[in-house]
Image (cartoon, coloured by chain):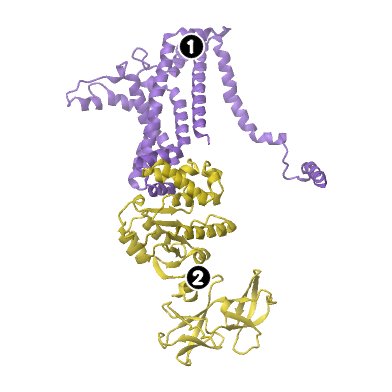
């Protein structure tokens, strides 16, 4: 009884007595997150809803007129062969590039996760290309792939192979863009994997050695389970990034030949800023947003299921 | 049970020699403890036995087989690491079974061994848990269990208790002693904690700067330390050291003059001591009795700090001629800081150390 009385008294006291450390909720605390919230709402939430609103209108930039058309832009997109091709191309590109980013990034990290100058130099080289701008990367690769005079042609010519223009091939244009993209930014996943590998206690590998684990068994039973969160992170980052493919395709193939390498973002750019149909471009943007949201949700769900203890 | 034989072992990192031509024989079924300060090479030696550290020169034989160039898994040893090194994503059962599965032990046999070790270490209820869901003590038991199931030729422990709190450390120490009695396996244990060494070891190997200072049974090392280093390292509180001058002794035994001029006739034989050797006298706190300052032949000093531990009292006495001496007082002693007291050294329990650090022990008094 006395205990109950005492606890009810102490429960009532803190707000009045603890002047320095109030534990209750207070609107004053809200001030700490206010700057972030303002920026977040103004630069992300408002544009998102504005974009949705624009996608429901027929907006003419030249005459400055807007007419509410409901879901007309979406139904037109559904019937648009070029848009459907762009969606197909984007998915194809993401499915090609993301597994390569994860697998190759991990392979490079495993190979270069060693002390010494050689490892450090190779890490710097592989990461080095990431700092180049898309313009330079695409220019370099266009020179490399140039028919008759490019580096590839110079290698294939003495071997008696005919000169192939990969960027003008419907079958090869998108895979080549995927290859260039991997070459360009493989450094980031490699660094993320390296950071994760260096977090694994060395003692675990020594214990595995004493437990007679082979190198393959050590990789599958010790290393991969230890970095599974990073694998999920890299996959999510790459899906987000690669769904937004634009610069490489725009500069290397202009979406051709025959729309075979046109991604969604290039379609949005052309609809919005070349044909000035902003409502139509906004609708395509919302479709891309929806696709990415679903892809993210699936990945987060899969990785959280795998991590469940 | 298997013995381990280390012959002329050497370990170099560039120009730095961390293990210097070390030789040691570990008897089958022995609990051997490598004891020494940080950086003395004890962990490196253990890791070389495990195969985790390449050997610069020399040989290691386990159960009569030369394993010097064999990988860790082929040496038939199991190791318990300081930070447990449990596989974090595996259950306790899988942690213990991992090594057995890797060498193709049949499933039934794996299960039998894991269940038996789990019963022995009281882990049965925890077999489905993951390391993150367990306390430090439980994790350490799993690490021991992982070693036990392999039924190795030798167990290697690398400071396995240093991450546990004091009470858990004491309990785990007893569990390890029981485990050794039950398995009667060869065990090598690395520690810098002399209490662990004294309580667990069949023999202690005291190491310093990559070399063995002394090998012996715990009380043998405590009573007859081979060098000044061992004398200072073993014992808590540590042995007291006083610079003394040698004077003419009686009956072939050394006499010394203490810093304040007091003459002490020891029972240390003169035979192995050079006539003009510069000497240092070592005496353990329990070999010093506290008397009245006016008593004849005592070293006079002032009590600075008095530590009451319940079962005994440690008095830190600042002696007049300089320096501090720690003495055991009776647990009910009334000694207080500031008291002037006399210290009487047990002449049959003192040690003399010459300039090279070698020890010369007093002969124990013959029983009346």
**How many residues crowd around disc 1 within 10 Å: few (fewer than 14), some, or many (20 or more)?**
some
Q: Secondary structure at mark 2?
A: loop
Tag shown at residue B34: none
- Give residue B290's position: percent from left, percent from top: 63, 81
Q: Chain of mark 1?
A: A
- Give residue A210's position: percent from left, percent from top: 39, 50
**Mark toward the viewer: 1 or 2:** 2
Q: Secondary structure at mark 1?
A: loop
Task: Tell me the quarter of the picture where residue B337 sits.
Answer: bottom right
Q: Nearer the viewer, residue A8 or A179?
A: A8
**How many residues crowd around disc 2 within 10 Å: few (fewer than 14), some, or many (20 or more)?**
many
Which residue lies under the disc numbered 1? A276
Which residue lies under the disc numbered 2? B234
Q: Is residue A247 visible?
A: no
Q: Is residue B349 visible?
A: yes
- Give residue B144's position: percent from left, percent from top: 48, 52
* Residue at (36% x, 24% y) in the render: A178
- Location of the C terminus of chain B by quadrant is bottom right
Q: Nearer the viewer, residue A153 or B139?
A: B139
On screen, residue B309 above or below B12: below
Q: Nearer the viewer, residue A274 or B279?
A: B279
Chain that the image shows in purple: A
């Amino acid at each position: 009884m006395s205990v109950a009385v005492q606890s009810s008294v102490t429960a009532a006291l803190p707000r009045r007595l603890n002047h320095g450390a109030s534990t209750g909720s207070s609107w004053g605390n809200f001030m700490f997150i206010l700057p972030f919230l303002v920026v977040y709402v103004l630069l992300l939430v408002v544009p998102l809803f504005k974009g949705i609103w624009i996608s429901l209108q027929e907006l003419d930039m030249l005459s400055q007129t807007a007419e509410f058309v409901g879901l007309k832009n979406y139904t037109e997109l559904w019937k648009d062969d070029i848009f459907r091709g762009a969606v197909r191309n984007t998915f194809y590109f993401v499915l090609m590039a993301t597994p390569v980013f994860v697998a190759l990034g991990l392979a490079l990290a495993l190979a270069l996760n060693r002390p010494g100058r050689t490892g450090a130099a190779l890490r710097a080289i592989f990461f080095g290309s990431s700092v180049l701008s898309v313009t330079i990367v695409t220019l370099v690769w266009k020179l490399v792939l140039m028919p008759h005079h490019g580096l590839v042609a110079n290698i294939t010519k003495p071997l008696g192979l005919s000169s192939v223009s990969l960027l003008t091939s419907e079958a090869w244009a998108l895979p080549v863009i995927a290859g260039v993209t991997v070459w360009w930014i493989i450094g980031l996943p490699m660094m993320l994997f390296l950071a994760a590998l260096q977090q694994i206690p060395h003692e675990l590998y020594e214990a595995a050695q004493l437990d007679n684990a082979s190198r393959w068994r050590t990789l599958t039973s010790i290393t991969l389970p230890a970095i599974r969160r990073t694998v999920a992170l890299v996959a999510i980052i790459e899906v987000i990034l690669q769904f937004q493919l634009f610069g490489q395709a725009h500069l290397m193939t202009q979406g051709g030949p025959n729309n075979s390498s046109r991604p969604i973002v290039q379609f949005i750019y052309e609809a919005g800023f070349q044909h000035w149909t902003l409502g139509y471009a906004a609708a395509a943007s919302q479709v891309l947003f929806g696709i990415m949201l679903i892809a993210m949700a699936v990945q987060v769900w899969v990785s959280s299921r795998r991590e469940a203890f | 049970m298997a013995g381990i034989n280390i012959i002329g072992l050497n370990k170099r990192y560039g120009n730095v020699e961390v293990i210097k031509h070390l030789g040691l024989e570990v008897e089958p079924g022995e609990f051997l403890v490598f004891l020494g300060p940080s950086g003395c090479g004890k962990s490196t030696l253990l890791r070389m036995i495990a195969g985790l550290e390449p050997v610069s020169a020399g040989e290691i034989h386990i159960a009569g087989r030369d394993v010097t160039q064999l990988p860790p898994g082929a040496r038939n040893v199991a190791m318990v690491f300081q930070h447990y090194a449990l596989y974090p994503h595996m259950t306790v059962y899988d942690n213990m079974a991992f090594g057995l599965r890797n060498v193709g032990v049949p499933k039934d046999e794996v299960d039998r061994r894991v269940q038996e070790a789990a019963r022995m270490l009281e882990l049965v209820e925890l077999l489905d848990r993951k390391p993150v869901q367990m306390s430090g003590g439980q994790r350490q038991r799993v690490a021991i269990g992982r070693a036990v199931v392999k039924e190795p030729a030798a167990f290697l422990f690398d400071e396995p208790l240093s991450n546990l709190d004091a009470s858990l450390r004491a309990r785990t120490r007893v569990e390890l002693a029981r485990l050794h009695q039950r398995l009667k396996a060869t065990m090598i244990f690395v520690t810098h904690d002399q209490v662990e060494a004294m309580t667990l070891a069949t023999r202690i190997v005291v190491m310093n700067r990559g070399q063995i200072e002394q090998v012996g049974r715990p009380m043998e090392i405590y009573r007859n330390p081979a060098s000044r280093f061992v004398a200072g390292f073993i014992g808590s509180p540590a042995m007291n050291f006083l610079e003394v001058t040698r004077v003419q002794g009686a009956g072939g035994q050394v006499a010394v003059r203490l810093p304040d001029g007091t003459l002490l006739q020891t029972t240390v034989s003169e035979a192995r001591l050079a006539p003009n050797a510069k000497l240092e006298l070592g005496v353990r706190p329990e070999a010093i009795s506290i008397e009245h300052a006016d008593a004849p032949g005592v070293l006079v000093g002032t009590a600075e700090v008095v530590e009451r531990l319940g079962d005994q009292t440690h008095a830190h006495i600042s002696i007049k001629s300089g320096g501090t001496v720690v003495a055991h007082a009776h647990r009910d002693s009334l000694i207080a800081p500031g008291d002037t007291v006399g210290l009487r050294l047990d002449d049959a329990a003192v040690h003399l150390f010459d300039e090279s650090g070698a020890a010369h022990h007093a002969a124990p008094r013959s029983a009346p």
